[in-house]
Amino acid sequence: MTEDNKNDFRDDCCKNLVYVSEDIVNTGIGVVIDVQNVYKYFGQLKVLNGISCAIKKGEKVAVIGPSGSGKSTLLRCMNLLEEPTYGEVWLDASIMTPVDPYLHKSILVKSNTYKRLMIEEIKSMLGKGEKDKLKYDDAIRLVDGDTLENLSDKVLKQIKAGDRLKKREGIEFVKAVKAYKDRYGVNINKARQRVGMVFQHFNLFNNLTILQNMILSPVQLKLKSKEDATDKALKLLERIGLLDKKDEYPSKLSGGQKQRVAIARALVMDPEVMLFDEPTSALDPEMVGEVLSLIKDLADEGMTMVIVTHEMGFAKEVANRVLFLDGGNIVEENTPEELFNSPKNERLKDFLSKVL
């Protein structure tokens, strides 16, 4: 991370101390995907700026905003196609990303940096000099509980705002991070199997038939037998009206047909959540409707989904919550009715005036 990136992070952390909610960790409270204070940098380019959002079971969340606002990057972080620079992504009550110590007070207080700064604060308060030797365990016994808590909050803010953790923070810190990951961690590949992803450009294998494209992942990952995967794929192809194309190659299909196959391919895996990254942006206008109709059918059946889209009418009709991103931030979120009809943020008002 560059020094400019660190300065941005410090500025953000100075505004408030963000920690992972223990309620989310312990109960999940119906949340399927939980994005916690996620930053994403590509070199010096800051794409996501401390985003937090929770996707609940059965929700249909539309993500809108201008090009370059971080919409697709946020979606890709949700299933770890991109790993956040800072922050965490949770699936149910399991952490998919590496543990971010800055989000866990119980881990930060085990760091050597925390202990060193606490000793300095206590010595300063008691009028002791640098030459006065004092161990951490002895130092914290010299102040009362309220004072200790206030000093702790002050030191934690210094650590977070200054990005002050070092590569080596002592064995207690290492053990705390490992214990947290051992308790809440999940195998990333298995977690991804629960999250379907549909891309802008289909990502079908041109050297495989439509049916072969659809059964490849579940069979190779040993999630289904070839017979079961084929049976599921054929039923899905029949549902989307492309059963007669099962032995064709992708080059023989229209853009709309390819995208419908891409959606059906994701469904063969029996995902709990579907992520759509501008699924109609690469289609000719007359093909958009057939793809949106399929997505709407999935929404009506109760599939949890997050959709990055430029189709404002579709977002109004299908979503029960809309996030507006600008500059790597969630600038406003609300129900479709409130967000589109009564926007609060001036940037959102300006955006809507150009796209509606």
Image (spheres, grey):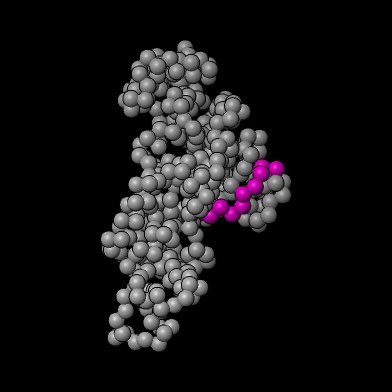
User: Where 164 falls versus 331 (above or below)?
Assistant: below
The residue located at (35%, 36%) in the rendering is 189
Q: Is 330 a magenta residue?
A: yes
Name the spot of residue 338 as percent of width and height, x first.
70, 46
* Span highlighted in magenta in the image: 328-337
Q: What is the total number of numbered labels drawn onto the structure image?
A: 0
Give the left or right position of residue 219, taking residue 152 as reference. Answer: left
The foreground one among 215 and 54 is 54
- Residue 254 part of the magenta segment: no
- For residue 245, which quarter of the picture? top left
Which quadrant holds residue 294? top right
Residue 147 appears at what percent x and percent y? 48, 75
Of 300 and 108, which appears nearest the observer? 108
At horizontal 58% and vertical 35% (from top left) the residue drawn is 58
The one of 172 and 49 positioned closer to us in this rendering? 172
Is residue 78 visible in the rendered structure shown here?
Answer: no
Extreme right residue here? 341
Is residue 256 at all visible to an observer of this figure? yes
Image quarter of the N terminus: bottom left
In-image side of 63 versus 151 (left or right): right
- Name the residue located 72 percent from the left edge and 49 percent from the top edge: 342
The location of residue 83, given as percent across then percent down, is 38, 48
Q: Residue at x 49, y 23 (%)?
A: 257
